Amino acid sequence: MLDLNDLYYFSVVVEKRSFSAAAEVTGVPKGTLSKRMRALEQTLGLRLANRTTRTFSLTEAGEDIHQHCLRVMNEVRGAQMAAQARLSEPVGRVRITCSGEMVSMALEELMPRFLARYPKIDIVLLTASRYVDLVDEGFDLALRSHTAPLQNCSLIARQVAQTHCILVASPAFFADGEPSTPQELDGVAGLQLKRADLASVWRVHASDGRTAAVTFHPKLYSNSARLARKSAIAGQGVALLPQPLCCDDIAQGRLIRVLPDWHIPRETLSLVFPSQRGMTQALRTTVDFLADELPGYLSQ
């Protein structure tokens, strides 16, 4: 198997027509270069150059091999330039995973703006209701909401915002009177924007430090924020939804906030990616854009 370093050294010696000049360019002693030339000739079984202390000339075989070396070196330089371009210019594909509600809350507005600003970046955005293994499943970036610190120490997590969920319902759902305490809400039809294997309980907190658990009847379990929101507007129950998703509905009177003096603990939103080492400029640009823009959408 040919040593590509030997091909490189050979091409430089030919270009400079001197081992001494080639040594200055490569930083490799001329004795080492001469030795590598002999090793290349032995590997090929051909004499590539006629050389004396004063002259250096290629044999016919050397001329032929040199032309191949030039093509190889050009491909290597092209690969290096392509890698440098990806590190210096935002170009390429970025694969993102996040929850469906994150798309509804912010990304369906942000992504078209991002694509218009960075036309050389392609986005693959897939939603999932679970934590995706970025490395095994080939993703570059995840948007994750969490209450406890993320545990995977091999990943980089950049906290960018706090997300706030509230209890909402149609005004018609409480036509006989809205509940004023968590106890009055016990047993209500709940529209849960989470997995079906979670407990059917909402844990709420008051500003004075009191806490309470509201047990609800799971009328609907779904990972679709749009479905939960529309079901609440249709009067099918009380939904726990991210506040940005329903602030317009509250302002327009389609929904009311249930137990407004009580709140659900906030979650942290983090941008998670495998490593900053070798991070492409396309991914870095995407992370920086989302870190700048997401707080404005999630703080409503």
Image (cartoon, rainbow, N blue to C red):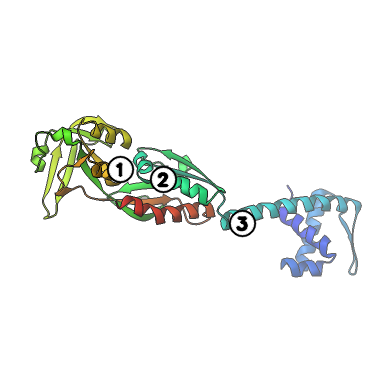
CB-based contact (under 8 Å), mark 2 and mark 3: no
Q: Which residue is mark 1?
A: 245
Between the C-alphas of marks 3 and 1, the distance is 41 Å
Marker count (numbered): 3
Q: What's under tag 1, amino acid-wise?
A: Leu
- In the image, 79 versus 126, the foreground residue is 126
Q: Which residue is mark 3?
A: 84
What element does badge 3 sit on? Answer: helix
Q: Residues within 10 Å of mark 1 (few under 14, many from 20)?
A: many
Residue 75, above or below 24: above
Picture coordinates of residue 142, whole percent (x, y): 41, 46
Residue 79's place in the image compared with 253, above or below, is below
Tag 3: amino acid: Gln
Disc 2 marks which residue?
109
- The quadrant in which residue 9 appears is bottom right
CA gap, disc 2 and disc 3: 31 Å
Residue that appears at 84% across and 66% down = 18
Give, as a three-letter code, the residue at label 2.
Glu
Q: Residue at x 91, y 52 (%)?
A: 60
For discs 3 and 1, the disc positioned in front in the rendered view: 1
Q: Earlier in the sequence, mark 3 or mark 1?
A: 3
Task: Please state which of the two labelled residues, at mark 2 or mark 3, is closer to the viewer.
Answer: 2
